[in-house]
Image (cartoon, grey):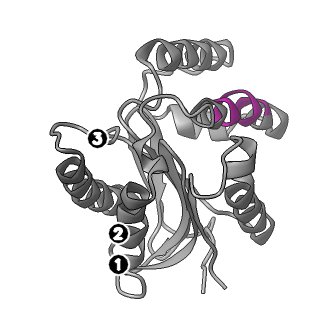
Amino acid sequence: MFELFDPAGEVTITEHHFPHWSQKGATYFITFRTEDSLPVAVYQAWKRGRDDWLRRQQINPLSRGWRSALNKLPREKRLEYHEQFTAQFHDHLDECLGACVLKRPEIGGIVAESLRHFEGERYHLGDFVVMPNHVHLLVQLLGEVDPETQCKSWKHFTAREINKDLGQSGHFWQAESFDHLVRTSDQFDAIRRYIAENPRKANLKPGEYIHWERK
């Protein structure tokens, strides 16, 4: 069911704070987070460190093609990047900063139901976890659906419903999401384990998160 990245296939790349690679029918690991999940100072310090590292590799972090340049580095340098910065970014999320309203079952449930809503129509949904201030999921997008558009759809609907329940207004989610094309079956299995172990890593108790596992 879950088609992996085809290196010979056509890829679309868009650059924002994070680069987004999209390929029709591929499977993605997606993370999106609440507006208050990372304080501005924490995010800026992370970004400064990342940008400095890229510059030391002769890569301009402000260029639209910095991700393409990163992927041309030797394998050990690419691993160093992900160990230092991709992993660090997710570790910051697991500190559960901010109001963490998704910890409440009725609020987290809005997100879980939204993810399941278009199963089999727009996408095949893999495992997911709704954490107190962020969401991780595996998903294969179908047809012309791309990760940015689908994430915007999830976030638009859930933000409206959550704000209604909380009696508030304004931004609920960070505008941009993190998405990664899954390249191998080993990587797919590793991401499933990461999703399953995420609540334990963040020292959460049962009832403070929602983990859904595709059978």
State the residue at coordinates (61%, 14%): 49
Q: Badge 1 is on which residue?
A: 117
Q: Magenta stretch mostly in which secondary structure?
A: helix
The span picked out in magenta is 80-88
Cβ atoms under marks 3 and 2 closer than 8 Å? no
Element type where label 1 sits in the image: helix
4 up-or-down from 174: above or below: below
Rounded to the nearest whole Å, what is the CA distance between mark 1 and mark 2? 5 Å
Residue positioned 61% across, 11% down in the render: 52
Q: Are marks 1 and 2 in contact (CB under 8 Å)?
A: yes
Would you place residue 117 above or below residue 15 in this image? below
| Mark 3 or 2, nearer chain start | 2
Q: Is residue 82 visible?
A: yes
Work out which quarter of the rendered image holds the N terminus and state it: bottom right
Q: Give the structural element (helix, strand or loop) at label 3.
A: loop
Task: Judge the density around disc 2: few (<14), some (14-19), many (≥20) Cα neighbours within 10 Å.
Answer: some
Q: Nearer the viewer, residue 180 or 62?
A: 180
Q: Which residue is mark 2?
A: 114
